[in-house]
Image (spheres, grey):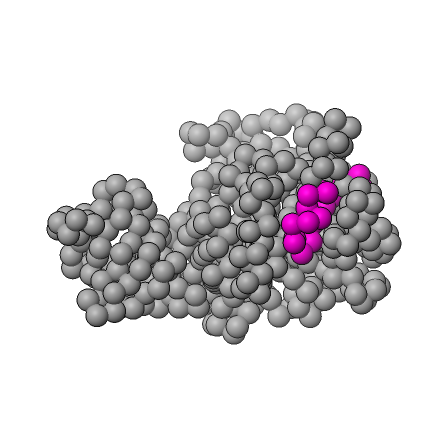
Amino acid sequence: MERFKTAIRYGADAVYMGLQSFSLRNLADNFSLDTLPETIEYAHERNVKVYVTVNSFIRDDDIDELKNTVALLRESGADALIVNDPAVIRICRRLAPELALHLSTQANTLNSEAARFWYEQGISRIVLARELTLDEIRLIRSRIPEELELEMFVHGAMCVSYSGRCLLSNYIDGRDSNRGECVQPCRWNYEVKDGRVYSAEVREHGKNGEYFTIEDDGKGSFILNSRDMCMAPYLKQIEEAGISCIKIEGRMKSILYVATATNAYRMALDGAPVELVMKELMRLSHRPYTTGFAFRESEKCRGGTYGNKSSLNILYGERPDELMEYQTGGYTQDSRIMATVLSYDECAKTALVEQRNNFKVGDSLNILAPSDVARSFNVTWIKNEDGESVPSAPHPKERLIISCPEPVMPGDILREM
């Protein structure tokens, strides 16, 4: 619920959320059907829509529970369900025909005929496959009914494959596994070149092909480690291609991630300088960024392209054309959350905060507020709720009173500089 409210406060027009079953994040701290109506009401009071994910793959043993879930969702007030399996669509059309249905990216919609087919099944919005280029999206948009909306992931983790729908061949060799061109990299006999521990042949054993570099830092190699999607500098091109909704991957993330990412894209949509937006997104816990397949020039082109702005290439990191990150499987993060603001005393210039990480007297904290990221201040003193001065904030979730000359609001986040 805290992340749900955070997304709303920091500028989301809609939030998608999972239940305790039938979503693709069953290990998350998901919402229950019992509390769903009041959760949705909270969003609607703030003019924000709620989309509930029912997008897992269904087996026959699930059908009775699925029917009960759909019947309850019908009364929940949800604005749409995000679905994938035709079984879910069929049951929803029968039991809850008034519920809008959005087709999950798991359905892998790649062309206008598929989009029209799903539209005929009652789908009102399609979250497109992530391997489409903007040119391909533009063509799809021109060939489908005007009222059928298109949605696109613009930020977050990129999957490598699921079931038989492999993307590894695309990444390594530019050949599309899902169009009959798979080079079968999962079955290659890899060999080490010249005794080096980090270089392996990318063709089957015995072929005289190019070598595909993989790194081993003592923890292993990372040939399946995709970069994170980031399309913040290109929202105008996305809109011009016919996308009506952009989607941020935010499930199982911290409130700092949700706040920073949502706020950055809201600022981008409102016209903030791209360098400021990217600076914010670099603060997130992330792998090196990529634009994925959006600007792929042809079927044989490996990797994305970032245009002519060298400043963006620097912000995106080395080798911005790469879709995969071979050197490390870890994440980088430019700042951590220190505390969340609970209340503010304007006269005393103090804030009651809930501590999340250790900070101390003398530290400088940056304020993350909706569309407001430039302010910071030095902590000159810290007191516990009993009024006793303490030199630092050592315990997570402890409530503290701190000096705060900059005005803040409940829900603002204090992060390290």
Is 399 located above or below residue 10 in the figure?
above
Q: Is 111 left or right of 308, judged from the image as shown?
A: right
Front residue of 386/90: it is: 386
Residues drawn in magenta: 70-87
Identify the residue shown where x is 53% and y is 38%: 28
Locate residue 275: give its quadrant: bottom left
Q: Is 81 left or right of 225, judged from the image as shown?
A: right
Is residue 73 on the magenta stretch? Answer: yes
In the picture, which quadrant includes the C terminus? bottom left
Locate residue 163: give its quadrant: top right
Identify the residue shown where x is 15% and y is 56%: 381
Front residue of 13/266: it is: 13
Is residue 246 on the magenta stretch? Answer: no
- The spot of residue 15 in percent (x, y) is 58, 55
- The spot of residue 297 in percent (x, y) is 70, 59
Q: Is 59 left or right of 9, judged from the image as shown?
A: right
Identify the residue shown where x is 55% and y is 51%: 39
Identify the residue shown where x is 51% and y is 32%: 221
How many callouts does the rendering have?
A: 0
Residue found at the far left of this picture = 389
- The spot of residue 49 in percent (x, y) is 61, 59
The answer to whether residue 383 is seen in the rendering is: yes
The answer to whether residue 170 is seen in the rendering is: no
Front residue of 263/284: it is: 263
Is 213 located above or below residue 319 in the figure?
above
- The spot of residue 74 in percent (x, y) is 71, 48
